[in-house]
Image (cartoon, grey):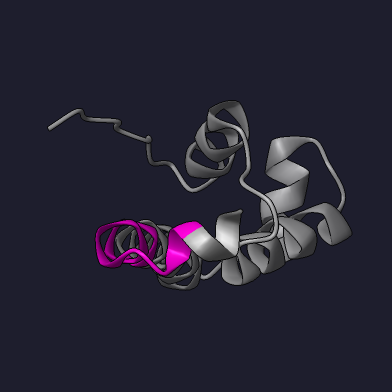
Amino acid sequence: MVSKMLKTPAVKAEVNKLNREEFAILDEILTARKEAGLTQAQIAKRMGTQAPAIARLESALATGKHSPSLTTLRKYAAALGKKVELHLV
């Protein structure tokens, strides 16, 4: 059923748009971490978790296999001294 829906140009365009937005979030997260000069282990410590959890989070965002919760993204952002803003447009 999904493959049939993806043949519809409007549906395919919307899926592509969502994928671009997810990759944009990943880029922002990785850029912010690198600009802060922090490792995955340092972010993990600030979040009260382990480095492999951060590696999985970043990997999941890159592959689109898992969407982290807003709470997790807020914790990650806070570990960088930043905040997440969510807007409806």
Observer-nearest of 89 and 11: 11
Residue 13 position within the rendered picture, expressed as x and y whole percent measured from the top left: 28, 65
Residue occupying the point 49% across, 68% down: 30
Observer-nearest of 11 and 32: 11
Is 12 one of the magenta-colored residues?
Answer: yes
Residue occupying the point 83% across, 58% down: 51
> Can you see residue 39?
no
For residue 76, side relative to residue 27 (left or right): right
Residue 23 position within the rendered picture, expressed as x and y whole percent measured from the top left: 43, 67
Range of magenta residues: 5-16
Q: Examine the residues drawn in magenta and state their main secondary structure.
A: helix
Observer-nearest of 83 and 39: 83
Q: Quarter-wise, where is residue 17 in the image? A: bottom left
> Can you see residue 89?
yes
Q: Quarter-wise, where is residue 27 in the image? A: bottom left
For residue 61, side relative to residue 23 (left or right): right
Residue 3 position within the rendered picture, expressed as x and y whole percent measured from the top left: 57, 65
State whether residue 82 is above or below residue 4: above
Observer-nearest of 66 and 83: 66
Quadrant of the snapshot with the C terminus: top left
State whether residue 11 is above or below residue 7: above
Residue 20 position within the rendered picture, expressed as x and y whole percent measured from the top left: 35, 67
Residue occupying the point 58% across, 34% down: 75
Is 63 one of the magenta-colored residues?
Answer: no
Q: How many marks?
A: 0
